[in-house]
Image: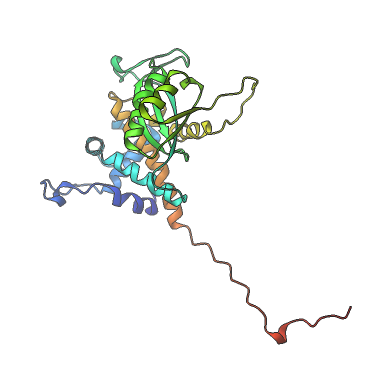
Amino acid sequence: MADAEWAVIEPLLPAPGWTRGQGGSPGSYCRRDIVDAVRYLTHNGPVWRALPADLPHWRTVYGYVRTWQASGATRRMHDTLREQVRVLARRGPQPTAAIIDSQSVKAADTVGKNSRGYDAGKKIEGRKRHLAVDAMGLILCVVITAASVQDRDGACPLLWRLVAGFRAVTLIWADGGYAGKLVTWTAGTLQRTLQIVKRPDNLHAFKVLPRRWVVERTFGWIMKHRRCVRDYERLPEHHETYLYWSMIHVMAARVARHQSAPPKPVPATPQPRAAHERAPLQAA
C-alpha cells in the first residue's frame, strides 16, 4: 500500500480499545501491516495459512477482519470512502439514483449446503450476490443469497435496504429480468420508480446499454480480486465483507491519486498592452 493510500485509510480505521479506556494492550503489529494483509488476501485470494511470512500472523489478521466486520467498521470505512469519491467527482455525497443487478459465483466446498443453490440459467452452483450501485458504479447495498434465488426475489430485500439507507434515491434502473410485479411492488410499497432498461429485440451483437453497463463495470472491478471470484466463506456476511474490501481497495487508490496530483496551473489572464505598444493602423 502506497503512503498516499495509507494516509487515506488510516483516519477511517476504528481506534483501538485501549485508547478508549476499554482495556487491552497495544497490538504487536502495525495496523498498516494488518490492512496490507487484508488487501493481499482480498486481491490475491490465498488461504489464510498461506499469507506471506513478512505479513502479520494469519490468526491476528483474521481476528481484525472479524472484529471490524462485527462492529460495522468495514462498512463505515467503505461508505466514507464512497462519499469522498463522489465529492471529488463533483457530485453530492448521497446518491439520488441507483442501478441493481445480480451475479452468480461458484462456491467452494467450505460453503454450507443451506446457503448455496443452483442457478439453472447460468449453470452455476453456489451463491448469488445482489448489488445496488450508484451512477458511478460504487456499491450502495449488498445482499448475498443462494444462487437458486430468482433475481426478483433477491431484489426485494435489496430494495428494502436501499430505501432504508438512502432516502434520496427515487429512481432505480434494472434489466429485463426484474420486469413484472417487482415494478408495481416498488412503486406501491416503496414509493420509488423502478425503470427497466430492455435489450432491443433486433440486437444480435454486443452493445453497451444505457445505465446497465455501470453495474457490469462494478462486477468487473470486483472480479479483479481473486477472493471474490469464487465464494469460500462459510457465512454470507463474510463474503459481503470481502466485497467491501475490494471496493475499499479501488476507492482508496482513486482518492489517493486525486490528493497527490499536483494542482492544475491557472491560465494567466492576458493584460491589455500599453498605448505605445499597440501596432499602428495600416492605411487601406
- Residue 131 percent coordinates (x, y): 40, 30
Q: Is residue 19 left or right of residue 213?
A: left
The image's colour scheme reads rainbow
On the question of residue 116 being in view, the answer is: yes
Question: Residue at point 65% right, 78% down?
Answer: 272
Out of 82 and 171, give the one closest to the viewer: 171
Quadrant of the rendered image containing residue 223: top left
- Residue 269 percent coordinates (x, y): 60, 71
Question: Residue at point 77% right, 81% down?
Answer: 279
In this view, 280 is above or below 38: below
Out of 226 and 74, give the one closest to the viewer: 74
Question: Residue at point 39% right, 42% down?
Answer: 249
In this view, 36 is above or below 217: below
In this view, 208 is above or below 30: above
On the question of residue 230 being in view, the answer is: no
- Residue 9 percent coordinates (x, y): 33, 49
Quadrant of the rendered image containing residue 241: top left
Q: Is residue 186 left or right of residue 51?
A: right
How many tags in the picture? Answer: 0
Quadrant of the rendered image containing residue 107: top left
Question: Residue at point 46% right, 36% down?
Answer: 221
- Residue 162 percent coordinates (x, y): 36, 33
Which residue ends up furthest to the bottom in the rendered image?
Answer: 276
Out of 9 and 178, give the one closest to the viewer: 178
Q: Is residue 274 left or right of residue 183?
A: right
